[in-house]
Amino acid sequence: MPRQVVILHGWSDDSKSFKGMAAFLRQQGWDPVPLWLGDYLSMSDHVKIEDVVKRMDQVLAGPDRVPGLDDSFDMIVHSTGGLVARRWVSTCYPSGEGCPVKRLVMVAPANFGSKLASTGKSPIGRIIKGWRRGGEVGTEVLTALELASDFQWDLAQEDLFVPESRDPATARSPYGSGKVWPFVIVGSHPYLSGFRQVVNEEGSDGTVRVAAANLNAYGATIDLRRREDEPGFFQRWTLRHEADQAYKQDGRPKACFPFAVLPDRDHGSITRPGEAPVPRNGPEESKLDHLLLEALNCPDGAAYRAIADRWEGLCEDTHELTRLGREQLRAVFPKHHRKMDRAFFHQYFQVVVRVEDDHGSPVDDYYIEFFHADQKGKAPAVLFHREVLEDVHPQAARPTRCFYIDRSDLMRRFYGQALRGKAEQDKTLNAMISAARPGRHVHYLAKGVAERKILAHSRAGKGERFLRRNCTHFLKIVVPRNPEDRVFRLSKA
């Protein structure tokens, strides 16, 4: 018999939007068991995700547990609901043991933010979304949802990465057999009608970037107190899955959460299984329906690993649409061909950068520029900043920035065209970081040096690359803070 399922909505939504999903599950055999629709306040300015999590645990597993809810169940979450669910797991079940949720199916989750969160907090956002609520738009939730937020950085340290100050041998992952199995499904189709078209962004479903949805994330620290050839200059963060022996027995010692990208679903239509996707030539069978059922029926660790492998193939199938010419793409999506562009199916890197000095204090005023080798400011660098670096989002609360890099254009246009004729090992992308002096008697980096060059990516060395397609990366850069000689002197009395 199917297991009970709890369905959780996202920001500015409620459970009414998911009655269709519940109806779909009943049609697929979930008739004998209750299905639950969760509601939480996402539009109250003073309610934090932590408040939702505390109350959520009381209702799902605590003193206010709903009569009839099983001790163990599955969960489907949408958009901001992904952050709510992950915070609940990491706060209440940090090792994953005892968590009532077994299969966590994340549909277009904003695991690593949404560009629209900052728009939601803006005056126009309050007019559009808050006019019926006295101007409230859920400021606290949107702050957590904003790209490069402290909330996402801290949450990733709790459920994905081993904190640098902690012994990896003691780390546990909340994910794995006997714990929680996450699955992520996201669309890569833009909104095609109405006012929503103005928020479309390539590599997204109109609201959430593909790379921001993917739970497979990576992290590293670059320590600029050291030379590039010194140990400790570049240190990858240990994934909890890599350190957790229980997870290694169940899966592979790397991030391998099942992740699928569908080319015919946007942020809204991905919540409606049972409905036909965007009309396209070819089979009209909805892959979304199949993926949801495959995740909810996953029986064991071996099947979970097999699903991860199969879904990876779907991601590449979606990316293959970028190879089609304009006429070919029109043939695939005949009804909306005038609004379609193959760039919507590009793969991206999302990189969240935080700069600190060697005392752990934030560095407020810094600049990162990209270029090839020593050709700073020349044609390849200009092409990268105009065509490959799609967006840089500064986080308002602290000097953390989110870089959105078109991986497809990096490989084809930057390496393939701008650097055409160069040897493969010479096709590199470098970054230059510069930091303004914090005051008259203190400067960053080495004495007399205002900037430092870093190798950001290389066409060669595929297995050694830090940046992975369709993924979010957390990068902490440590810069030395150096006082001038006059800050302290010693002389004979």
Image (cartoon, grey):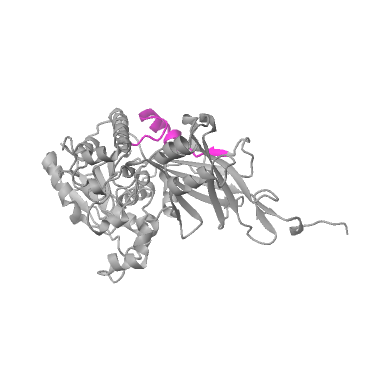
Position of residue 275 in the picture relative to residue 438 (left or right):
left
Image quarter (top left, top right, bottom left or bottom right) of the C terminus: bottom right
Vertical placement of residue 422 versus 367, above or below: above
Vertical placement of residue 323 versus 8, above or below: above
Q: How many marks?
A: 0
Vertical placement of residue 132 versus 170, above or below: below
- Residue at the far bottom in the pictured view: 134
> Horizontal and vertical percent for residue 107?
27, 45
Q: Nearer the viewer, residue 178 or 230?
A: 230
Q: Tell me if I can see residue 451 in this picture.
A: yes
Position of residue 421 in the picture relative to residue 93 (left or right):
right
Image quarter (top left, top right, bottom left or bottom right) of the N terminus: top left
Q: Tell me if I can see residue 404 in this picture.
A: no
> Horizontal and vertical percent for residue 220?
51, 41
Q: Nearer the viewer, residue 54 or 155?
A: 155
Residue placed at 47% from the left, 36% from the top? 415
Q: Nearer the viewer, residue 333 or 87?
A: 333
Q: Nearer the viewer, residue 23 or 169?
A: 23
Residue placed at 18% from the left, 39% from the top? 286
Position of residue 76 in the picture relative to residue 474 (left or right):
left
Q: Which residues are magenta?
A: 234-257
- Residue at the far right in the pictured view: 493
250 falls in the magenta region: yes
> Horizontal and vertical percent for residue 201?
34, 50
Residue placed at 61% from the left, 44% from the top? 224
171 falls in the magenta region: no
> Horizontal and vertical percent for residue 2?
17, 38
